[in-house]
Amino acid sequence: MRLQFMMRVALFAMVGIVLGRSATAVAGGDDPGFLVNFVPSIGTSRMQIGFGINGEGAVVGIASSQLGNPSAFAPWLWEGGPAPIGIGPPLGTYDFLDAARINDDGLIIGTLYVPSGGPPTVGLGVPVPVGTTRAVVFESPGVVNMIPGLGSILGEVERSNGASGLNDFGDIVGASIDGGDGPFSGIRRAFLYDRSGQLHDLSGIAGAGFRATDAVDINDSGQICGHAVAGGLTYAFRHDPQLGLRLQGPPAPGESLVVRAMNDLGQVVGIIRNKQFEFVAGFLWDGTTLQRLGPYRPLDINNHGEIVGWATTDIPDGPFGFERHAVWFDGAKWHDLDVRIGTPPFSWFGQAVAINDAGQILLRQEYTFQTVLVTDNALVLTPGVPPLGDVDLNGFVDPIDFSAMYSCFSGPAGLRPTSCHGRQDEYSDLDDDGDVDLADLWVMQRLMEVQPVD
């Protein structure tokens, strides 16, 4: 690696004098900094969605090269290398297979979908009827095993099942629909598929009187959370192996609770909705007290109590209603992550899908232009202060940063160009004088000249 040390020291001393601030000031006061990494495309994928991230930062999701064509979706795993790896059987042997969650031991779970109108799936060795789903475990790249439905131990016809949560010991929870007289009928019951490969019926986990139960998540203490239906309303539950059941009923008349995730402390997050299935508020529940989270819709919570999800803004978005942005609760306040990392000049949908205990956030950003889906990206945000001049927040300064800065160049009139979006202008205004001018471009050029070269 070639690096002119004395030139670097001299330059940053000069930058300190000219700019009157340190590189850490780029993060903006009490607004925490993030480094941004786009998950690289797998093959020719234009639509790449991340669903889960583990404690090591490994990400799983699905990709498609044909937007809107479910049969083109395939599961992938990304561990920080130059590209994700495909982890499903060969394309064409199934209809739609996702990778939804990954634990710290690298175990991955997902769901196989067989859309109505499509042919039965035979690629996994067992035919799956049209219009059904199957929970799966990825044993190794290309090797997928299906989790049996509860019908297999209850003497009923297996219809559909899906896995939604797992812990670091390999215990998996979800819901199974079995019995009935057709593929869309049957009884919905929660299940546990434990680390030894034993399937357990959890239909009574929320107590008597509930006609449908879903186990949504399981933590390392063996606590299981989910929701169950009774009297037309949905209750939240948390079951502890030692302490037993905690049940949370409707917070207000006509309201229902939908659980999304739980951490190892037993804190549960989800949403509140009304009888018309309309969103009312997000919630945080510790098994005793339920706290409303206002307009924020949680999707995950880590062991530090940080929550991620999404919220609808008041910015019109044409036929899509209003823009939807990814949000993050740091334990004290909420942050709009889409504004934090820059807004593209398109309509969009943002979601913070998951967060690990290192504070890494898995983000989904869907860009549309004139009602047409342009691309769908998976991003990983890692806590950290970007270096001075790192406009795209990927951890280093390169020609892409120079190009992004140039798009914010104010010119003689001092006006901010429309091509400069989000907080891109803030990271481009290196001397904090309110615009991006020749002085900023000059400093950026000097910064690029001292970057290490392999």
Image: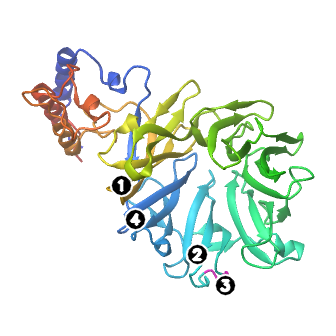
Closer to the observer: label 4 or label 1? Answer: 1
- Left or right: residue 312 versus residue 267 is left
Seen in the picture, residue 72 relative to 256 is either above or below; the reply is below
Mark closer to the chain start, 2 or 3: 2
Q: CA distance from mark 3 to mark 1?
A: 37 Å
Residue at the spot of label 1: 368
What secondary structure characterizes most of the magenta part? loop
Mark closer to the chain start, 3 or 4: 4
Mark closer to the chain start, 4 or 1: 4
Seen in the picture, residue 210 relative to 1 is either above or below; the reply is below
Dot 3 lies on which element?
loop
Residue 284 lies in quadrant: top right
Dot 4 lies on which element?
loop
- Amino acid type, label 3: Pro
- Left or right: residue 46 versus residue 59 is left
- Please report contact status of discs 4 and 2: CB closer than 8 Å, yes or no: no
Q: Nearer the viewer, residue 132 or 428?
A: 132
Please say whether residue 454 is visible from this viewpoint: yes
Q: CA distance from mark 3 to mark 4?
A: 28 Å
Give me the disc on residue 42: 4
Q: The N terminus is located in which quarter?
A: top left
Where does the magenta region start and end? 124-129
Residue at the spot of label 3: 127
